[in-house]
Image (cartoon, rainbow, N blue to C red):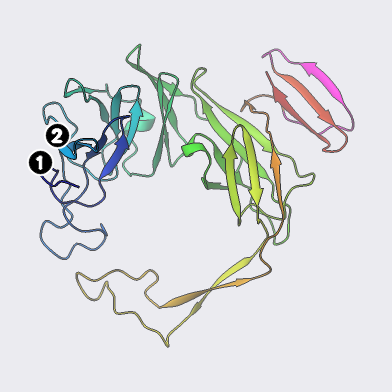
């Protein structure tokens, strides 16, 4: 790959394929570990970027005029013929870049729930002319590209549990694993933001015929189905391993940080999983009715939510 006109050396850069070229932007100095900054400037946020054309093995610099300020951890997504750069550590903002015109267009400030997010733990989804931002606090907003404006997604009381994003459609769908005792069925919920309606939707996972656990194994979202394989409960313990100390910080500046400081090794107790299953869930508005019933029912409430259930699950969930 040619280095002529390539962006400066950096780590933690963002990148996305535009359809004909690779766009690279942002990052930090030269340090691959942002928590190991022993050298001056090694972790300084880096701005600017470039477009690489594999057909001609050539780089073209991206304009700096109107570009987001230098940062690391930004998300880069293809939005039609444009490239979105959004977010990053301490930067809840972004812009769209037009590769053909070499021009940036800054997005307006997001709603307060997003503007208050100061970390890089967020997800960005491009969906049918909209950009959906979800923070690690499960607060969300939808940006309509045609209308060039934001809509705040009302906060929702999502089911409690551990958020898990193993292969779930590029963060479009969130798996919320219920915290259960060892050996309990792999139950939980799926959650997503409906961009058109600007609201959260939930799909409870039925306990009937569920895998032993959702906390291990492969969990993927494929063509509207949740596929689980190899899920089996394994208790994970961390035991002290003082016989194999690591030469690391924070006592030695410039060296990797050990967390925890005492060397440990991971021990898994329990058999590996050989089971699997698939489920095509039904997503419902988060505030629709959910109840337990003794038999099949069907009705509507004043919000337009219908309810249904059966004896096998003894559960009623709501849907439009």
Can you give x and y, in whole percent of width and height, for residue 174 in the image?
A: 54, 39
Can you give x and y, in whole percent of width and height, for residue 245 in the image?
A: 37, 83
Helix, strand or loop at label 1? It is loop
Residues drawn in magenta: 290-304
Helix, strand or loop at label 2? It is strand
State the image quarter where residue 144 is shown: top left
Q: Residue 60 bears which disc, if any?
A: 2
Q: CA distance from mark 1 to mark 2?
A: 6 Å
Residue drawn 69% across the image and 42% down it: 278
Which quadrant is home to the C terminus?
top right
Can you give x and y, in whole percent of width and height, for residue 128 in the image?
A: 45, 20
Q: Is residue 88 above or below residue 34?
A: above
Residue drawn 71% across the image and 46% down it: 277
73 and 21: which one is in front? 21
| Residue 70 in view, yes or no | yes
Q: Is residue 93 above or below residue 166?
A: above
Is 216 included in the stretch rendered in magenta?
no
Counting residues from the start of the chain, the first of labels 1 and 2 encountered is: 1
| Outermost residue toward the front in this view | 55
Q: Going by the image, does 237 lie left or right of 119?
A: right
Q: Is residue 142 above or below residue 304?
A: below
Q: Residue 151 bears which disc, if any?
A: none
Residue marked by disc 1: 5
Is 294 included in the stretch rendered in magenta?
yes
- Name the main secondary structure of what is drawn in magenta: loop
Q: Going by the image, does 185 lie left or right of 18?
A: right
| CB under 8 Å between discs 1 and 2 | yes
Q: Going by the image, does 151 lie left or right of 23?
A: right
Q: Residues within 10 Å of mark 2 (few under 14, many from 20)?
A: some
């Amino acid at each position: 790959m040619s280095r002529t006109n390539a962006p400066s050396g950096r780590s933690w850069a963002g990148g996305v394929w535009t359809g004909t070229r690779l766009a690279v932007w942002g990052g930090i100095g030269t340090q691959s570990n942002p928590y190991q900054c022993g050298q001056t400037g090694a972790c300084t946020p880096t701005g600017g970027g470039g477009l690489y054309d594999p057909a001609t093995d050539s780089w073209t610099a991206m304009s700096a005029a109107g570009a987001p300020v230098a940062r690391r951890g930004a998300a880069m997504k293809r939005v039609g013929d444009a490239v979105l750069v959004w977010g990053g550590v301490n930067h809840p903002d972004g812009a769209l870049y037009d590769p053909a015109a070499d021009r940036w267009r800054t997005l307006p400030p997001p709603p307060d729930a997003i503007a208050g997010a100061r970390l890089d733990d967020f997800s960005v989804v491009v969906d049918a002319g909209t950009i959906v931002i979800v923070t690690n606090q499960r607060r969300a907003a939808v940006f309509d590209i045609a209308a060039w404006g934001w809509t705040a997604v009302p906060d929702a009381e999502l089911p409690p549990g551990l958020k898990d994003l193993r292969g779930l459609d590029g963060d479009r769908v969130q798996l919320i694993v219920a915290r259960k005792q060892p050996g309990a069925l792999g139950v939980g919920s799926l959650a997503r933001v409906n961009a058109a309606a600007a609201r959260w939707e939930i799909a409870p996972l039925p306990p009937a015929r569920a895998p032993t656990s959702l906390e291990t194994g492969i969990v993927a979202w494929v063509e509207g189905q949740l596929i689980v394989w190899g899920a089996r409960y394994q208790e994970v313990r961390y035991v002290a391993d003082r016989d194999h100390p690591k030469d690391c910080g924070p006592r030695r500046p410039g060296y990797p940080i050990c967390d925890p400081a005492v060397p440990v090794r991971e021990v898994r107790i329990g058999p590996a999983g050989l089971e699997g299953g698939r489920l095509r869930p039904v997503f419902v508005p988060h505030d629709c009715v959910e109840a337990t019933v003794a038999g099949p029912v069907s009705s509507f409430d004043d919000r337009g939510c219908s309810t249904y259930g059966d004896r096998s699950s003894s559960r009623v969930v709501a849907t439009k």
